[in-house]
Amino acid sequence: MLQKPVNNLTGVGEKYEEDLALLNIYTIEDLLNYFPYRYDVFEIKPLAELIHDDKVTIEGRVIYEPSLQFYGKRKSRLTFTVEVEGVAVKAVMFNRAFAKKQIHKDSTITLTGKWDAHRLQITVSNYKIGPAEAQTKIQPMYSLKGNINNIKLTKTIQQAIDKYLGAVVEILPERYLKSYKIPNRQTAIKTMHFPPNRIALKHARRRFIFEEFLLFQLKMQLLRKLKREATQGNTQQYDSMKLQEFIQSFPFTLTNAQKKSLNEILVDMKSPYRMNRLLQGDVGSGKTAVAAIGLFASITAGKQGALMVPTEILAEQHYESLQELFSDRANIALLTGSVKGKKRREIVEGVENHTIDIVVGTHALIQDDVYFADLGFVIVDEQHRFGVEQRRTLKDKGLHPDVLFMTATPIPRTLAITAFGDMDVSVIDEMPKGRKEIETYWAKENMLERILGMIENHVAAGEQAYVICPLIEESDKLDIQDAVDLHQKLVDIFPSEVRVGLMHGRLKSDEKELVMKQFADNEIQVLVSTTVVEVGVNVPNATIMVIYDAERFGLSQLHQLRGRVGRGSKQSYCILIADPKGDVGKERMRIMTETTNGFELSEQDLKLRGPGDFFGKKQSGVPEFKVADMVHDYRALETARADAQEIIEKNLLDNDEEFFQLKQLLLSDSAFSSTLD
Ligand code: ADP
Ligand code: MG
């Protein structure tokens, strides 16, 4: 019934049908599900409160018969006077000559239109004979194309509702309608188009938000389940005793968040499925420590591990910290582009004949001639810096190895739920105890002298500083010039014993590495840099981060930059030099000075930017919802997610009558029709 084409409705001819097709409306069902994009709310207010030029609604009594004038061919103007609160108001209505027959002296009438407060006149766009039904009228506003206007579409939808609403089938199980107190599908559709009041509208919207999220979550979780079952993995029989002993050898105890993530990883490793997990956590939250335990588990299971990172310095740093943690428990090798000749040959051989247990490296790890004897555990750090192809190549060097991706870019929970449909996510949202929180200040450019003085004092005390220049595009010449100029300026200002280095995207990668190494070795004390410094390098001796034109960065990026300091035992500072013009910019600076928690910050960022912008246009895996909004309705998203989980775990689609319609709906989706049932 609902699949009938719209031309089954009276008044829908060929032209109208074409216009409806522009809105992707072909069937009665499409029409019923074409919800208003907003609502105009008309409230009857006292005349004195009406604002000039606003769209208003008034109710009054006609005191003079309307007079009608024609001009041009089909143009007309109807004028009459109504009494409102004892005041005579003039009403003007264009091109609706027929109304003259309906409007009579002494009848009560409700008028909506544009208000002219100076002439006490209303230019009527809508009228209704009789009093206003309620103090408030909610008018649906549809987005339109072609020759369709709002009145016409509203009437067509009204007709569709009158004739076909009874055919609409409920797809949500009764239990959800009851426990969430949401209206059934028929009521909700009618209410979306013709809301009797605000509260009813709110509940109808709540229903569709839940429905959209539940369907989305069900599809995603089903796909994930199918994928999981299709990816054969290995059961890694690690040695729990040895693992305990290893963890106890650490100079610290794991935080609860680390323990939880570790546990999730170990469960994956034991399972017959291949692990495909993202480990998220702020810089310094202890991801590497958790990853190291995973690596060790794999080794006790007789396998090898690999850790791939984006730069050579990072590889070296990870190599050193792993060696420290493992001491003689594993044979660890470093394989980067600068490892060459005999040394490289030895490592490649060792990897192939399993005398090496763990390799840490850059892209050099995925070269063709690197074969692993038995690769069981793969870690990719700062995963977004590698292409899909590179990640896959490393993974393919083993037989279904477990894979762990790590990132220090916190992704809001709401997005993580949706964006990583095929990945499991672990979160370390707690910092090890005893860290000093970075103090963040927002400064204006005219405080530069004081800031430079502060840098000088800290350098004199043996510490180091970053000074970041903004860089929107790596190829942006002007911005590089900024960095070059600033570098020169600082060289001139600081005494000669303060060495100032320069780093930007135009340097060759070995030049960048050299500068970074000099900074890491404290041969350079102040590093002027564009944002290329953003990723992963650990210089615990650096305690000051100055960010120029901070208003040009997003919150996540500012947070990443700030994470370069605060890695040692000394108090660190972040100074944002910014003069934001807009409210959003000011809000960003305020948030930065108030929190150092990356997850909290990313949630705020999401609110300021919206989900589309958050991921950038290209990789936006964020689905479009008709009614729901991932940011504002995140509670409903969580609810729907839990419900979807329960449906799948208990297999309610097959086992419970109430879920019959929902299952039919999923079956009609091509992605599932072959696999469900
Ligand atoms: P990430 O990889 O998340 O940036 P790391 O694992 O490199 O963090 O840890 C940062 C520093 O904190 C390292 O020096 C590490 O030894 C230390 N660390 C890790 N976990 C803890 C903990 N639970 N308690 C104290 N220090 C820790
Ligand atoms: Mg790290």
Image (cartoon, helix red, strand yellow):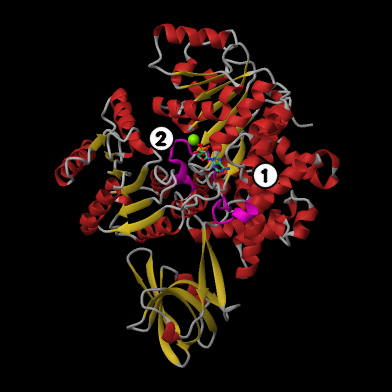
Camera-nearest residue between 380 and 616: 380
> Does the magenta stretch mainly form a helix, a strand or a loop?
loop
Give the crowd class for mark 2: few <14, some 14-19, many >=20 residues within 10 Å: some
Residue drawn at (63%, 69%) of the image: 199
Q: Which residue is mark 2?
A: 537
Specify the farthest residue to the left. 492
Magenta stretch: residue 644 in it? Answer: no
> In this rendering, is residue 448 above or below 505?
below
Secondary structure of residue under mark 2: loop
Is residue 399 visible to us here? yes
Magenta region: 611-637
- Give the x, y percent position of residue 596: 46, 53
Q: CA distance from mark 1 to mark 2?
A: 42 Å
Question: Which type of secondary structure does the marked residue at label 1 adopt?
Answer: helix
Q: What residue is disc 1 on?
A: 215
Location of residue 444 in the rendering, given as x and y in whole percent from the top left corner? 26, 58
Closest to the observer, 303 or 55? 303
Please tell me in which quadrant of the rendered image residue 665 appears: top right
How packed mark 1 is, by other alpha carbons closer than 10 Å (few <14, some 14-19, many 20 or more), is some
